[in-house]
Image (cartoon, helix red, strand yellow):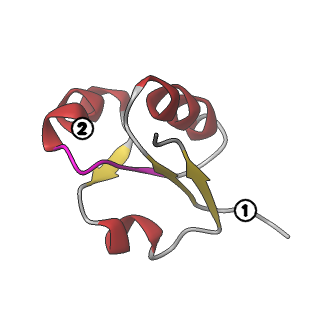
Amino acid sequence: MTINQVAVLGAGAWGRALAGQFAGAGPVTLWSHNPSRLEPLAQLGLRYTTDLSEALADADAVVIAIP
């Protein structure tokens, strides 16, 4: 199985760290219910959203990093 797209759910410390690591290998979408957590991540080149269905739409793998 080839993983082309990863969705990371949660933009806390773990979610941001994991998304950053996965981004080195391919496309990542980071999801959070809180848009203020996502805005600073634009400079990292990560795709991000507050819409859960959008985050999961094209994901081959999902990482859950929420409490």
Q: Is residue 50 above or below residue 56?
A: above
Local packing at callout 2 (Cα closer than 10 Å; few below 14, some 14-19, many 20+) is many
Q: What is the x, y in percent for residue 16?
A: 45, 30
Q: Nearer the viewer, residue 10 or 22?
A: 10
Q: Earlier in the sequence, mark 2 or mark 1?
A: 1
For the image, the number of numbered tags is: 2
Q: Nearer the viewer, mark 2 or mark 1?
A: 2
- In the displayed image of the protein, which residue is found farthest to the front? 67
Q: Is residue 9 above or below residue 51?
A: above
Q: CA distance from mark 2 to mark 1?
A: 24 Å
Name the residue rendered at 62%, 39% in the picture: 22
Q: Nearer the viewer, residue 17 or 64?
A: 64
**Which residue is the site of mark 2?**
38
Q: What is the x, y in percent for residue 15?
A: 48, 35
Q: Is residue 62 above or below residue 41?
A: below
- In the displayed image of the protein, which residue is found farthest to the right? 1
What is the three-letter code of the residue carrying label 1? Ile
Q: What is the x, y in percent for residue 62?
A: 60, 59
**Which residue is the site of mark 1?**
3
33 magenta-colored: yes
Local packing at callout 1 (Cα closer than 10 Å; few below 14, some 14-19, many 20+) is few
Looking at the figure, which quarter contains the N terminus?
Answer: bottom right
In the rendered image, which quarter is residue 25 located in? top right
Helix or strand or loop: what does disc 2 sit on?
Answer: helix
What is the three-letter code of the residue carrying label 2? Leu
Q: What is the x, y in percent for residue 52?
A: 34, 66
Q: In the figure, is residue 18 to the left or right of 54? A: right
Name the residue rendered at 19%, 43% in the picture: 34
Name the residue rendered at 44%, 76% in the picture: 57
Name the residue rendered at 29%, 31% in the picture: 41
Magenta extent: 29-34
